[in-house]
Image (cartoon, rainbow, N blue to C red):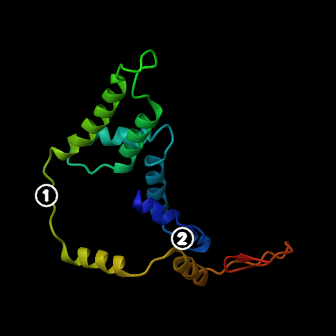
Amino acid sequence: MAVLSAFDNSAVGRLKKTWMMTNKSTIQTLAQIRKLLGANRNFTEYREIVHSVNPPCIPFLGIYLQDLTFIEDGNPDYLHKSSNLINFAKRQKTAEVIRELKQFQNFAYNFHTIPEFQDYIKGQLDQDRDVDRLYERSLKLEPKQVDNASSTQTYSSYTF
């Protein structure tokens, strides 16, 4: 999801010429990731893949948090017929989500330290990557085209 978010960033997404030069297999891989992580039908494809893989697996926590939020907000704590009868169906749905998430903690994750990779990530995180600066860099790589048919001209991110 983080990789997809990076590609969908406006500074990256607007680079039409760069995208046209991108390797076809990279574009296809990105399309597969988009399809897999698409929110269509409540992330059905992602959920099917996660249920079919053999652990260890690190799931995307955001989907489970979304499920818990919908259960919490969309279901009353007590049954409508009586204000003192607890809605056990809501508690059962919450328990199912937590149980599914906990199953990923039952397996050993044998990670190996790769110093070069860690150094690269730390170096990237230390750099200032605010949205405005990234967009300015994007504009340097591929300046906006002035639309002659329009009476407005666009400079940087301002329209006059």
Residue type indicated by callout 1: Asn
Q: Secondary structure at mark 2?
A: helix
Real-space Cα separation, disc 1 to disc 2, in angstroms: 34 Å
| Quadrant in which the C terminus is drawn | bottom right
Residue tagged by mark 2? 12
Count of picture labels: 2
Q: Residue at x 48, y 67 (%)?
A: 23
**Residue 47: percent from the left, percent from the top?**
37, 40
**Residue 33: percent from the left, percent from the top?**
43, 53
Residue tagged by mark 1? 110
Whether residue 123 is visible:
yes
Looking at the image, residue 5 lies above or below residue 56:
below
Q: Between residues 141 and 21, which one lies in front from this camera angle? A: 141
- Location of residue 144 by image quarter: bottom right
Alpha-carbon neighbours of circle 1 within 10 Å: few (<14), some, or many (≥20)? Answer: few
Q: Is residue 152 left or right of residue 7?
A: right
**Residue 66: percent from the left, percent from the top?**
42, 44
Q: Between residues 22 and 78, which one lies in front from this camera angle? A: 78
| Quadrant in which the N terminus is drawn | bottom left
> In the displayed image of the protein, which residue is found farthest to the front?
84
Whether residue 54 is visible:
no
Q: Which mark is residue 156?
A: none
Q: Between residues 144 and 78, which one lies in front from this camera angle? A: 78
Q: Residue at x 34, y 49 (%)?
A: 61
Asked if labels 2 and 1 touch by Cβ distance under 8 angstroms, the answer is: no
Residue type indicated by callout 2: Val
Q: Residue at x 40, y 61 (%)?
A: 2
Q: Earlier in the sequence, mark 1 or mark 2?
A: 2
Looking at the image, residue 63 lies above or below residue 2:
above
